[in-house]
Image (cartoon, rainbow, N blue to C red):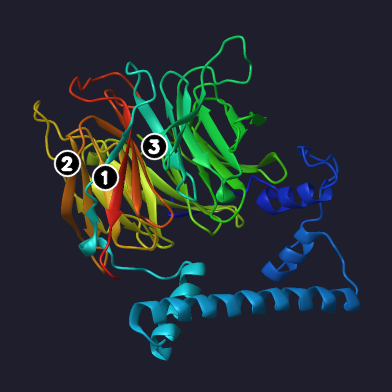
Amino acid sequence: MPSFFIRDGSKKGGMAIAKRKFKQKRHSPNAIPEKKKKSLRNEEISSDEDLSADEGVHFTAEQSDDEFEDVQETAFRKAKQLLADIREEEKAEGGEGDEDAIAHRLKEEALSHVATLHRRVAKSAKTADSVVIYRAHSCRFSIVAVAISHDTRYICSCSKDATIVKYDVEEGKKVATLKYDKKNGKSHKGQIFAVAISPGDRFLVSGGVDATIRVWNFANLELVKEFTGHKNAITGLAFRIGTQQLFSCSRDRSVKAWDLDQMGYVDTMFGHVDAVTDIDVLSRERVLTCGGQDRTLRLWKVAEESQLVFNGFASSISIDCVAFINDEHFVSGSADGSLCIWSIFKKKPVCEQKEAHGRGADGQQNWIISVAARRYTDLVVSGSSDGYVRFWKVADDYKSVENIFSFELAGFINCMKFSDEGEELVCAVGQEHKSGRWWTKSNARNVVALIPLEYAEE
C-alpha cells in the first residue's frame, strides 16, 4: 500500500532550481532551460530568500527605498479607491454609509483576496430562467471539455474531431474556430481532451491524443508555442490562480509543470501507476490529480517535491474526476457512481455518497464523468449520463452532502467549469463519453450549455 506521504528523493533540484534556470535566461524569453553538466549548489533557503533569489536583481539601499515608496503609494491609492467604492455602494443600498457594514465589506474583500473566506451559498443557489445552448460543432462529435474566460465574456470548447471553438457570450454566437488541417502543422492531430484559459485571458492552451500542448494567443487564436514532453495523450490542463504557471496530466502517468512567462518546461512529477485522468490547482503550489484505475488521488507539493497519497475504496473501480473545494478539501467522482469528499488530513474519503446519479436501465450505477466546485464555498456539482446535472451542498463538517436540486440536461456531461464568481456553470455535453464510444445517447445533442446561477444575499 502506498505511503500517505512520499518524497521523491531521486530528483535533484526540482521546481526551485528550474525556476532559477529560467531567471538566469530572462534575456531570451523563448529559451527552454537545459540541464547543466555542472551541478548547481544545493542549498535550503527560506521563502523570503527564495523570492529574492528568483528576482535575480540586487538593489542598493537607496534604490530599495525608492522602490518600496512607489509600491506603498500604489497600495495607498488602491485602498482609498476601494474604500470610496464601498462607501458609494453602501449609500446606494441603504442611504448613509454604515461604518460597521463598511468594515464588514472590507474584511470580506481582504479574505477573498487571500482565498481563505469559505462562503455558504448552496442553500440559496438556483438556476436562472434561461439556459444558453451553443451548437457550433459538427453534430457527429461529442464536446469533450470547456473553459470560460476570467471576464466571463468568452467560452472555449473542444471536441473529438480535433476542433476548438470560441464563443462570445455577450453576442451569443461563435466567433472563431480552429479545425484539424493535415496540411497545417499547427493544428492538433486527433481528439482534444483538455482546454484551459490563463489568468488575465492571455493564452488558451489545449492538449489531446497527439501528446502536445499548444499555446494560443487568446485574442486571435494564433499559435504561440508548442510544448512536447508527454509520451501519451494529455488528459487535463490547469493554471495556478493568478499566475502563468501551467500544470498538465497525461495517460503516460506523469504530471508536468510549465511556465508561460518563460514559455518553457519546468518539472515532471511521477507517482501514479495508471493514466492520470484529471487535474486541478488553486493559488498555492499544490496540484491535485486522480489516477483512474489506480484508485488514488495525489496532492503534489511542488516546491517541496513531495506528495500526499489518498486511497479510494476498491469498489470505486476508477476515480476519473476531481476538483478542489478549498485548500484542505476536494471532491471526486468514480465509475461506480460514488461522489466523495476528501480532507488532506485523511487517507480515505470523509464522505461517500453512493449511487449519486442512480442506476441506468441496465441496472448498473451511472458513472460520474465530471465534477466541479464553486471554490471556497459549500457548492459542488456532478455530471453523469442520467440526464441531470446535480447540485450538492457540502455539510459544514464535510461528512455529508445533500442534493439541493438537479438540472435536466440530456447526454454525457463530459466536463463542467464554474466562472470565477460562480455565477455561470459551463457544461460540455455529448452523445458519447469523452473517453470512448461504449454507449450512445441518441436523445442528446453535442452542445455547450451555459447555466446561469443566482444566489440570495450571502
Inspect this view and state whether residue 380 appears: yes
Secondary structure beneath disc 3?
loop
Q: Of callouts 1 and 3, which one flags the residue occurring earlier in the amino acid sequence? A: 3
Instruction: Identify the residue at horizontal 59%, vertical 38% (top origin).
Output: 219
- Crowding around mark 2 (Cα neighbors within 10 Å: few <14, some 14 to 19, many 20+) is many
Q: Which amino acid does label 3 sit on?
A: Gly
Extreme-top residue of the structure: 183
Rendering quarter of residue 314: top left
Q: Is residue 212 above or below residue 353?
A: above
What is the distance, in whole Å, between disc 2 and disc 3 at their CAs?
Answer: 31 Å
The residue under label 3 is 172
Q: Where is 189 relative to 293, above or below?
A: above
Residue 357, labelled with which disc? 2
Please, what is the three-letter code of the amino acid marked with disc 1?
Ser
For residue 382, the mark is 1
Sequence-wise, the earlier of marks 2 and 3 is 3
Rounded to the nearest angstrom, the CA distance separating label 1 from label 3 is 26 Å
Asked if residue 78 is positioned above or below residue 265 in the image, the reply reads: below
